[in-house]
Image (spheres, grey):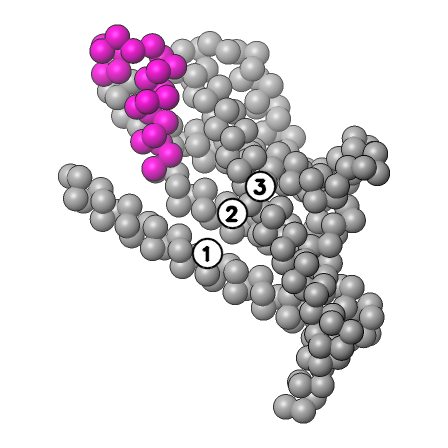
Amino acid sequence: MDKIIKALQLNLIKDNRYIYILDGLKNTMIITLFATILGIVFGLIIALIRTTYDNTKRLKILNAICQVYITVIRGTPVVIQLMILFFCIFTSRNTSGVMIAIIGFGLNSSAYVAEIFRSGLMSIDQGQMEAGRSLGMTYLDTMRFIIVPQAFKVVLPALCNEFIVLIKETSVAGYVAVQDLTKGGDIIRSRTYDAWTPLLIVAGIYLLLTCIFSAFVKKLEVKLRRNERTAG
């Protein structure tokens, strides 16, 4: 027990090293939140383009571009994508590493979110589209007011799970000079030469965050199922 207390004092208390953990946790949550928002926006756009092509055979060129985009993003490691953004595209030192990480993880997430949204859109009964069109609504209005809201409700738990996945994926943000949670623990390790304690602390925080948000997703799924039974 004394060894544990001494290890915690060395890695957290001495020289206020816990600040590295707090700053890293803050950056991790900022990156995850805004990357999720970016991923949802771009993912929905891609999903709408692909679904429109599947239903109407329109937007053929845009659909082809989206297919290539999804293939490339899902087929290459996210850390490579981050490094390309940091070292090849955003070469100016004025560009924040956190901003680059948000863009990188957001674009990566959008490829996966697009397929989540697409499956949700395709799960809506075709009669919903036909009903909207029979009422005189345009295709876009029918998608906007009838199809997308229903699809969003269907895929909401999956989107929350994507947020959880992103929390863990951001652990590679240190490759682009971002002091995320993992990098904060690594900085402490380099100062104390104690690898076990900071790494276990970081792992414990990731585990705690994952458990908290996973519990939220489960409650959300139960609530959605209850609402469906009530509506039925």
Q: Which residues are magenta?
A: 131-153
Amino acid at dot 2: Phe
Query: Mark 1 = which residue?
Result: 213
Q: Secondary structure at mark 1?
A: helix
The nearer-to-camera label among 3 and 2 is 3
Q: Earlier in the sequence, mark 1 or mark 3?
A: 3
Tell me the crowding category of disc 3: few under 14, some 14 to 19, or many 20 or more residues within 10 angstroms, Cα based: some
Query: Mark 1 and mark 2: span between their CA atoms?
Result: 9 Å
Residue under label 2: 163
108 left or right of 83?
left
Q: Residue 193 in the image: state x and y as whole percent.
A: 82, 74
Magenta stretch: includes residue 81: no
* Residue 85 at x, y percent in the picture: 75, 35
The crowd level at tag 2 (other Cα within 10 Å; few <14, some 14-19, many 20+) is many
The quadrant of the image that shows the N terminus is: bottom right
Which residue is pictured at 60% across the width and 19% down the height? 65
Marking on residue 34: 3
Find out whether the residues at labels 1 and 2 contact each other: C-beta distance under 8 Å: yes
- Secondary structure beneath dot 3 equals helix
